[in-house]
Every structure is written in structure tokens, then in C-alpha cells.
Image (cartoon, rainbow, N blue to C red):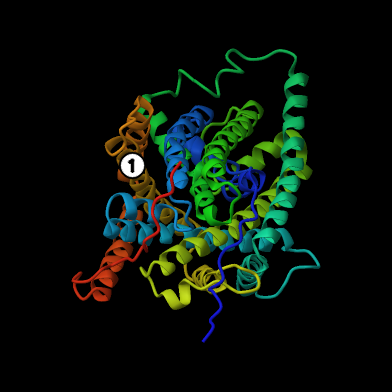
Amino acid sequence: MNTAPDPTLRRSLTLRDLILYGIIVIQPTAPMPAYGVFSNAGHGHVVTAILIAMVAMGFTATSYGRMARIYPSAGSAYVYVGRELHPALGYLTGWCVTMDYILNPLICTIWSAGAMTDLLAGTPWEVPYPGLVWPAFFAGLFTLLNLRGIQSSARINQLLCAVMGAVIIAFFWVVLARVLQLGSYPDHYFSRPFYDSQTFTVGRLLHGTSVAVLTYIGFDGISTLSEEVENPKRNILLATVLVCLLAGLLAALEVYGAQLLSSQTEFPEGEVENAFSHVAAGAGGPLLAKAISLTLLVATIGSGMASQLGAARLLYGMGRSGAIPRKFFGAVHPISRVPANNVLFVGAIALAGSYILNYDAGAELLNFGALIAFMGVNLAAFVRYYARDRQRTLSTFLMPLLGFVICLFLWLHLSTMAMVAGSIWMLTGIGYGAWKTRGFRSGLVDFGDRPPQAE
């Protein structure tokens, strides 16, 4: 009896596609929605906090890229930790980071639905029951786009980057025009966004940095596409590090421009979410503020679509190795060559969750699983490239250890709600693993016999 081989993922993504994907997941406008939160946390030192966070995330990005050279797998952190440290730790890492991956499209659905409701309020296009209609619309949109296949998603990412880039350029133009119109400048006008002696303390800066690291959450999604990339050993490392660098520099320029437009460093409750738009409106008028609001909506749509793609790939990697039901999660659609079951699964959770959670609660939970994955990948890179490699270097010793320590520091400073909810999710995963293995008496994960790939 002849049986056709199971369909596999198609290698069609270039380095450019990876960079665009990573930028879309992080969002070119990443600091804009949270600008008020960053400013309040760091008492105005937003630029410095973002740049420090960029260096911190650069260590972890390097670890991701290095591990992708050895294990070009859709499972990403789950595979790296499971193969280098222990299968049970890999399973637990995958379980924890799944919460982060699934929550991202969920909160994007919530934010997009709210933004569309506000944009259309009082217009002829306002829809009845927007709280029911728009979550269903955006969860369905993200799902439909991802079901079309990876090449279609890459083309959409290019369009989204072009739209967001145009509005960002318009914002920079307004900033430049306003700065040139001033003629004379207050003392420390250009350096104040980096350092303000009246509000600076080390504690405030570190707290601001722990919040500003949210700007970079999502870069690890690049490694989940390892099985769909041309030359993954080279391109995953380059794309991951370049995305962190480009996103950080762009974010720093955006908030620097905002701080040149306004000396306000703290925003009261009710203005925090729209702080960036309010600052922009002061210089560019309501038209620019509306354009930025629309751009943030476009950016969130792109991020929701891309993060759902990453979540589907992570579930595929876990399903293929048997950590979760293989028949459902490890399947690939024979025509589109995407894990369609997983795309539909994540879309269903995004839809249901958008009617239960609010944006703030979902956003606070994101970092729990992400930082656990970051710590695990840094340890895996240390073990692989330093503890077990005879060609040890200062770089392979210092970079993953610094990445681990920084991520541990940030994880310990998560909110109480995030720690409690994340711990419950983690314990649920441990319980499922115990049930699956009859009290851990059998193998938890089957990574197969595929050996690590030589560099």
C-alpha cells in the first residue's frame, strides 16, 4: 500500500521577508501606544530606557540566532531548551511561551476592536453592537489572512510596512518643522530626553527599562519560521539581531521626537493610552493625530496577524514532537502548506478571549511566558556554545549569561497579577504533562532522531 508522505512546510522566505515579519510583529510604531506608560515609569527618560532595553534584548536575540543555526525548527525556544537542557524543560518552556504567543493576537484583537469602535463612533459607518461585531471581524481577519499561506503573509507584511512608514515619516517631518520654527531653545533641550537631572534616579531608569522592554516582545517569533526560510543558519541570526537593532533605533527616534514636541513627562490616568497622539496633535493638529491613530490600528492588525502565525508554528513544533496531541496540532494543510488547525485554534481563542479579558489584563500577562523562554534560550546557548564546545570564546560565555541575568531581573519585577496567572498556567501545563505520562513514568516529548545540524 502506497502512502503519500506527510506535507511539510515550504522554504520560501528570504532574509528581507524575515526582517519585515519581525518588524511587523514588534510594530514600527511599538512605543507609540505605550509612550505614556514608558514616560511615567521612567519619569521622562524614555529614549534612554529604550536604548538600554535594546542592548539587553540584543544578547537574547543573539542566543536565538545561534540556536537556530543548530536547530532550524518551527518549535523555536521549545526545541532549543528541550534538546540542549532537558526534554521536560523544553516542554515547560513551550507551554509557558504558548501563553505569550496566544495572548498577543488576543490583545491585538481587543485593541483593534476598540480602536475601530472609537474611529467610527458618531459617523454614518458606525455599526450596532460594536463590542460583538469588531472582535469577531478582527479575529476572523487575522485567521483568514494566515490561512492563505506564508507567501501571502509576506506580501501583506510589505504593504503594512509601507503604510506605517509613510505616517512615521510624516510625524518626523512635523517634528523637524516645529524644532526649526522655535529659533531659540531652552537649556538642555536636545539632551533632556536622554537625561534630566531634575527627575533622574537609577531606580526610575531601571523601572522604565523593565517596562520599555515590551517594545521588543515578539522578535523571537522570527525563529519559529526556521523551517520556511532560505538558508536558515545564516538568515535567522541576521534577521533576529537586525530586527532588534532596527526596532530599537526607530523606537528611540519616535519617542525622542515626541519629547522634543512636549516637555510633559507624566500623564494622568485617562491620557496614558493616547499620550503620543495628544503630543502629536499639539504640533501637527488633529489630522496628524488621526493619522497616527489609524497607523496604530494598521500596525496592530499586522502584529495580530504575524503573532498568530508565530503561535501556529510553535504549536506545530510541539504537536509534531508529541508534547501536545500530534494528530491535530502537528498537521499541515496539503495545499496551503500551513498548520491550518493551529491557525483556527488560535483564532478561536482570540475571539473568545476578546469577550472575556480587557487589554490591560492581557498585556500584563504577555511577559511571563516570553521572559521564561528568553531565559531558557540563553541557558541553552550557553550550554551548547560554551559548556560543550571546545572552541570557547568570551562572547559565547558572556552574552548568554548577561541575557539570562537581565531577563531574570525583569521576570522577577512582573506584576503580582501576571506572576499569579502565569504560575497557574505553568502548573496546568505540569499537570497535563503528569497526566500524559502517567506521573512522568514515560517519555514526555519525542523530538525524533534528527541530529543537530552542523554549522
Q: Residue at x 73, y 41 (%)?
A: 165
Q: Residue furthest front?
A: 1
Residue 148 lies left or right of residue 36; in this view the side is: right
Above or below 60: residue 420: below
Where residue 362 sits in the image (x, y, percent)? 46, 59
Where residue 436 sits in the image (x, y, percent)? 28, 75
Above or below 230: residue 326: below
Where residue 291 sits in the image (x, y, percent)? 75, 47
Res. 308 image quadrant: bottom right
* CA neighbours of label 1 inside 10 A, class few (<14), some (14 to 19), many (20+): some
Q: Residue furthest bottom?
A: 1
Q: As rendered, which of 50 and 162 lies closer to the eye? A: 162
Q: Residue at x 29, y 68 (%)?
A: 428
Name the kind of residue labelled 1 in the image: Arg
Q: Residue at x 62, y 73 (%)?
A: 136
Above or below 22: residue 393: above
Disc 1 target residue: 384
Q: Residue at x 32, y 34 (%)?
A: 401
Q: How many marks?
A: 1
Q: As rendered, which of 71 and 201 lies closer to the eye? A: 71
Q: As rendered, which of 58 and 179 lies closer to the eye? A: 58
Q: Secondary structure at mark 1?
A: helix
Where residue 14 sits in the image (x, y, percent)? 65, 47
Residue 349 lies left or right of residue 425; in this view the side is: right
Residue 27 lies left or right of residue 368; in this view the side is: right
